[in-house]
Structures are given as C-alpha cells and as structure tokens.
Image (cartoon, rainbow, N blue to C red):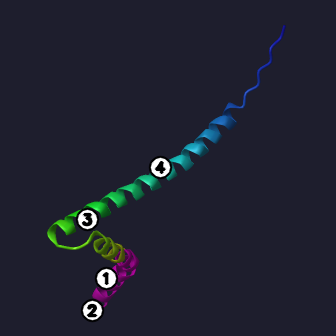
Amino acid sequence: MQINIRTNFPDVAKALGDVQDKLASQVLARSLNRTIEQARTEMSRLIRAEYNLSASYVRERLAHALRMASAAAPTSLHSRHARCRAV
C-alpha cells in the first residue's frame, strides 16, 4: 500500500497572509470609525452639559465644524506658512 500526499502550503500561507492584511485594514478602519463616533458623542455631552442646547443642534454644528476643519486644514496650514516665509 502506498499513500501519496501533496500539499500546497506556500499557496495556503500566501492566501492566509492576504486575508490577514485585508482583515487588518478593515479592523483598523472600523475601530477608527468607532473611536470617532465615541468622541463625537462625548463632545456633544460635554457641550450640552455646559450650555442649554439640543442634542440635534450640537450634532449638526459639530459635524459642520469637523467638515470645515478637515477640508481647510491642509491648505490653510500650508498657505499660512508660505505667507510667513514670504514676509
């Protein structure tokens, strides 16, 4: 009796590595998104504890402020430094 076993361990290891890389990226993105959600919630709670504002109003204003800050930060920071050097 003869038994012949063939394996493709290198292919399996590569496939598992690819899956791990993709999974790690997804886990990182999800954890960052969850952290951001928790930070927004905490910011809203702190603001509402200090001022008499509705949660929906604070949420709306925070979303707007965060959009403006993320859109303006790279270009405005660069522009400010460029102007300072020119003076």
SS of the residue under disc 4: helix
78 within the magenta span: yes
Q: Residue at x 26, y 60 (%)?
A: 42
SS of the residue under disc 2: loop
Task: Give the label, 2 or 1, closer to the camera.
Answer: 1
Classify 10 Å Cα crowding around label 4: few (below 14), some (14-19), many (20 and above).
few
Going by the numbered disc 4, the residue's amino acid type is: Val
- Residue topped by disc 2: 87
Going by the numbered disc 2, the residue's amino acid type is: Val
Gap in Å between the C-alphas at discs 2 and 1? 10 Å
Position in image of residue 16 (x %, y %): 61, 39
Q: Residue at x 27, y 92 (%)?
A: 87
- Residue topped by disc 1: 81
Q: Residue at x 17, y 66 (%)?
A: 49
Placement of 49 over or under 73, stated as above or below: above
49 within the magenta span: no
Q: Left or right? Give the position of 65 relative to 8.
A: left
Task: Give the label, 1 or 4, closer to the camera.
Answer: 4
- Residue topped by disc 4: 27
Which circle marks residue 36 in the picture? Answer: none
Gap in Å between the C-alphas at discs 3 and 1? 30 Å
Going by the numbered disc 3, the residue's amino acid type is: Met
Gap in Å between the C-alphas at discs 4 and 2? 46 Å
- Which of disc 1 and disc 2 is earlier in sequence? 1
Going by the numbered disc 1, the residue's amino acid type is: His
Mark 3–mark 1 CB contact (< 8 Å): no
Task: Give the label, 3 or 1, closer to the camera.
Answer: 3
- Residue topped by disc 3: 43
Q: Residue at x 80, y 18 (%)?
A: 4
Gap in Å between the C-alphas at discs 1 and 4? 36 Å
